Amino acid sequence: MLTVRTVFIADGISLADVACRHEQGRGEVEPASARMLVLVRRGFFARSANGVVSVLDPTVACFINPGEEQRYDHPHDNGDDCTAIDLDATLAAAVHGGEPGLPVGAIPISPTLDLAHRALLAQARRGDDRHQLYERAVLLIAAVLESASPGRVASGSPGGPRARHALAAAAREALAERPERTLTELARDLTVSPHHLSRVFSASTGHTISRHRMRLRTRAALERLAAGENDLARLAADLGFADQSHLCRVVRSESGVPPSVLRRLLT
């Protein structure tokens, strides 16, 4: 039995918690229906596709391309648990140097990447900020791709320091105008891949695009509080926070004090 629980969907990405409880044995051949990255959290199984047999356990990942004739074999009865990230052709091409076709075979996963994918799943289950989840998912996909084909992934990287600084400045300008712009929209407007935009921005500013967006929202909240805003629910809705609780968490994280204290401090 296969159970798929989708925990996050946005801009060409779908993140799911997959639990497989098939009994020991050989699977049926069937075409893959989606393009995805599969990271194993528990268990062991083998995937056959395009004449390649990939033995999968928590130390490796694999990519799946739509239409591939695949078969899953299970040598044990206790099943497995995986994290599956679906990505559309546009995003795959943007991250993979213009090519939507993803690598075939098992890809070794470092302890750092393993922890990153587990943390991403936990954050998605909690319902963390969607922009932050999206950026982390794109960076995770790119990091796994980079370990498989580094030259192709790096092909969209801007040139020298001046070009990278200009790209980060252009992203800041776009976010200042409209903070709700997604990473995909920013990358499209600036004609770069989401992965490289995120990397260049972080290297230039010291924080991620999603963190920068939150800082802009926090500054806007402080200005509204200083002007006498009393309705935190309305403030959260106006500024793009998920709810009042999300607003309070972010403002406290950025400033060190809750909105109620800031209101007294600033007015």
Image (cartoon, rainbow, N blue to C red):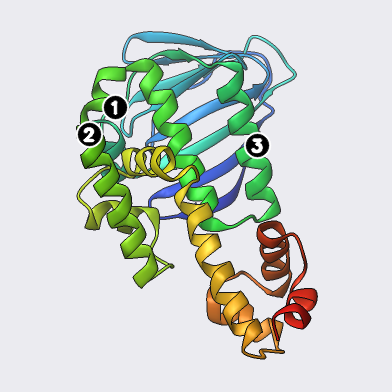
Inter-mark Cα distance, 1 to 3: 23 Å
**Can see residue 29?**
no
Residue type pointed to by label 3: Ala
Horizontal and vertical percent for residue 99? Answer: 21, 32
* Kind of residue indicated by mark 1: Val
Circle nearer the N terminus (1, 3): 3
Q: Quadrant of the C terminus?
A: bottom right
Report which residue position mark 2 lands on. Answer: 156
User: In the shown orientation, is residue 207 left or right of residue 5?
Assistant: left
Left or right: 165 with respect to 244?
left
Q: Are the residues flagged by discs 1 and 2 in contact, CB closer than 8 Å?
A: yes
The amino acid on which the numbered mark 2 sits, given as a three-letter code, is Gly
| Mark 1 residue crowding within 10 angstroms, few (<14) / some (14–19) / many (20+) | many
Q: Which residue is mark 1?
A: 153
Q: Secondary structure at mark 3?
A: helix
User: 156 or 105, which is in the foreground?
Assistant: 156
Q: Which residue: 59% across, 32% down?
A: 117
Which residue is at 79% across, 78% downward?
A: 260
Viewer-proximal residue among 94 and 168 = 168
Q: Which residue is mark 3?
A: 119
**Residue drawn at the location 43% of the way across and 27% of the way down:** 143
Q: Kindly indicate the quadrant of the structure image that contains residue 50.
A: top left
- Residue situated in front as seen by the camera: 169 or 243: 169
